[in-house]
Image: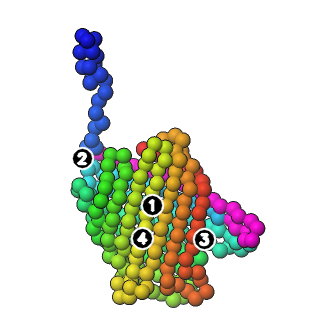
Amino acid sequence: MRFCYFLLPLLLLLVRPARAQRADTTIIRYTGQLTGQYTSGGVNRTLFATSHSVTLLRGLHFGAPVTGSFTFGKQEGRLREREWLLNTTPYYWKGRFRFYGIGGYERSNLRGIDNRYQIGAGPGWAIYTDSLNREVAVSNLIIREATYFQDGSRRTVARNSTRLKVAYTYRGFSLNSVTFYQPNLQNFDDYRVTQQSSLALRFTPRFAITSTYTYTFENRILEGKPRDNTNVTVGVSFSTK
C-alpha cells in the first residue's frame, strides 16, 4: 500500500498534460494525395488525380488552408478530363463560431471552362468538434463568380454557397467529406452541387491508403458538355503533423 502512495506522485510527474497552443504559435500542416483508376471492357478509361493541402494555423483564432488538385482522364484513348482547382478559405474562429473568406480558381475541359474565378465571405458554425479533430460544421457564404467558357462567352453571377463539412477518425480510419450547394441568387433553378468524400486507412502517422469519391453537377453549362461527373479513385496519401 505504501508503494502505491509512492508510485502515484511519480506517475503524475512523468505523465504531463498536453500543452494548449500558445497565442504566438505558428503551425503548418501539409497533406498530399495521389489516386488513380483504370477500367477496360465496355469503356476503356484511365484517370489520374492528385490533390495537395497546406494549412497555416496562427495563434488561437486564425487559420488559412490552401488546397489544389489536378485531374487527368482519357476514355477510349481520347482526352476527356483535364481539371485544375485552386482554393483558399482563410478563417477566424472563436469557440464554435467561424468567419470565412474564399478565393478560388478553376479550369475544366470536361465542362468547357477556360477560367473561373471566385471571391466571397460569410459566417460558419461548428456543430460538433473535439480534440481529435473530429468535426461537423456548416457555413454560408456569398460569392461573386466570373466564368470564361471555351466558346468565348462569359458569365458573371452572385451565388449563395452552403457547405457541410464532416471529419471523423476512429483508430486507423479517417473520413473527410465536404458538400457544397451553390444556387444563383437571381435564379435558384440555376445551381451547382459538389460532393467529395475521402476514406483513409492509416498505417503510420504519415502514410495512408485512400479511396476518394467525387461528384459534381452544374445545370447551366455549354451545350454538348455533360452536366454531371462522378469519379471513384484509390491511392495513397502523405501528411505531416
Name the residue beneath numbered marker 1.
Answer: 177
Q: Where 159 falls versus 168 (above or below)?
A: below
Q: Are marks 3 and 2 in contact (CB under 8 Å)?
A: no
Which of the image's four quarters has the N terminus? top left
Earlier in the chain: of badge 3 and badge 1, it is 3
Label 3 SS: strand
Residue 44 located within the stretch drawn in magenta: yes
Q: Where is residue 151 in the image (x, y as percent from the top left)?
A: 57, 87
**Residue drawn at (39%, 80%) of the image:** 183
Label 4 sits on what residue type? Phe
Instruction: Report how far apart the C-alphas of labels 4 and 2 lie in the structure.
Output: 32 Å
Name the residue located 49 percent from the left edge and 64 percent from the top edge.
196
Q: Give the mark nearer the N terminus: 3 vs 2.
A: 2
Q: How far apart are marks 3 and 2 (CA)?
A: 42 Å
The residue labelled by disc 3 is 82
Q: Would you name the residue on which mark 4 appears?
A: 180
Structural distance between the alpha carbons of marks 3 and 1 = 23 Å
The residue tagged 2 is 23
What residue range appears in magenta? 24-46
Distance (Cα) linking label 2 and label 1: 29 Å
Number of residues whose C-alpha sits closer than 10 Å to that of mark 2, classed few (under 14), some (14–19) or many (20 or more): few
Instruction: From the viewer's perspective, tell me whether residue 106 is left or right of residue 91.
Output: right
Q: Main secondary structure of the magenta part?
A: strand
Q: Which amino acid does label 2 sit on?
A: Ala
The mark lying in front, picked from 4 and 2, is: 4
